[in-house]
Amino acid sequence: MPDTRAIVTGHSRGLGEAIARRLLTRQARVLGVSRGGNARLASEHGGALTEAPVDLADDRALLRWLDGGALERFLSGASQALLVNNAGLLQPIGPLEVQDPAAVARAIAVNVGAVLTLSAAFVAATPDAEDRRILHISSGAGHRAYAGWSVYCASKAALDHHARAVALDRTPRLRIASVAPGVIDTDMQAEIRATSEDRFPSRQRFEDLQREGRLLSPDAAASAVVDVLMGSRFGDEPVADVRR
């Protein structure tokens, strides 16, 4: 049985928590990276879960943490190493004239900057791993534009294109894919439904999905994502959707 170790960002709630739990039940050791910890996961899985309280919006804090060698220590000796870039921010929502520049900078730092930084650090920390996999949590918003979501759409498109370009590099023993998990019943969906239509004209579509019971549970979405991540064909397509 391989020694599998996985880094999951944004593991404190929602999809990230569900992905971390799925990996832990598959006997992987997990390093959760987020501003807050997850007491529930820690109580369920004890020493199999390591947590790093890092604000991914703070690039200096992220670099300090990486410089401290925590990633290398966690991944040392792993035969299979996984990185799940799950953490993401939806705000700011609305057209340019109402976007707070500080919120734009924070979203890009979390949704793009931290993802690219961690991906590079992950590969540098796993030179001897037999099997290395990077999965970005993407979205249909990466290829379909929505009014009011210019920052979110741009950030998800960036992850898709990052995966395409990294795949062309053909780094030894590395597979990568940017994967859309479907529409999930998380705090982000509640945030969408609470947004005024003048800022997000497509709000009604997401209200309808919730009312009709068409939102995936985080656990169901995590099951599909982890099946893709651990599958033999992972990375065959650098941009994927669990619904296809």
Image (spheres, rainbow, N blue to C red):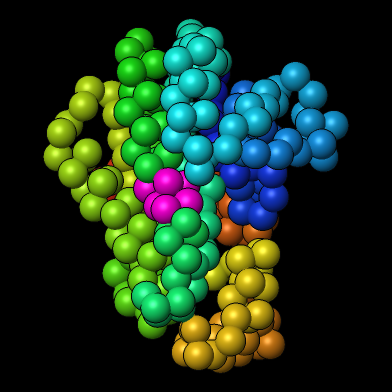
Q: How many marks?
A: 0
Bounds of the magenta segment: 105-112
On screen, 147 above or below 159?
below
In the image: residue 102, left or right of residue 37: left
The quadrant where residue 122 appears: top left
Q: Residue at x 69, y 44 (%)?
A: 12
Q: Residue at x 54, y 15 (%)?
A: 70
Return the residue nearer the eye: 148 or 119. Answer: 148
In the image: residue 27, left or right of residue 127: right
Q: Position of residue 88 (x, y in %)?
A: 51, 53
Q: Residue at x 42, y 61 (%)?
A: 101
Q: Residue at x 61, y 53 (%)?
A: 15
Q: Quadrant of the N terminus?
A: top right
Specify whether residue 233 is in view. no
The quadrant where residue 117 appears: top left
Secondary structure mostly seen in magenta is helix
The quadrant where residue 179 appears: bottom left
On screen, 194 above or below 10?
below
Return the residue nearer the eye: 98 or 2. Answer: 98
Q: Quadrant of the C terminus?
A: bottom left
On screen, 164 above or below 68?
below
In magenta segment, residue 111: yes
On screen, 62 above or below 146?
above
Q: Position of residue 108 (x, y in %)?
A: 40, 52
Return the residue nearer the eye: 225 or 165. Answer: 165
Q: Position of residue 19 (x, y in %)?
A: 61, 45
In magenta segment, residue 109: yes
Q: Position of residue 55 (x, y in %)?
A: 57, 38
In the image: residue 170, left or right of residue 242: left
Specify whether residue 203 is in view. yes
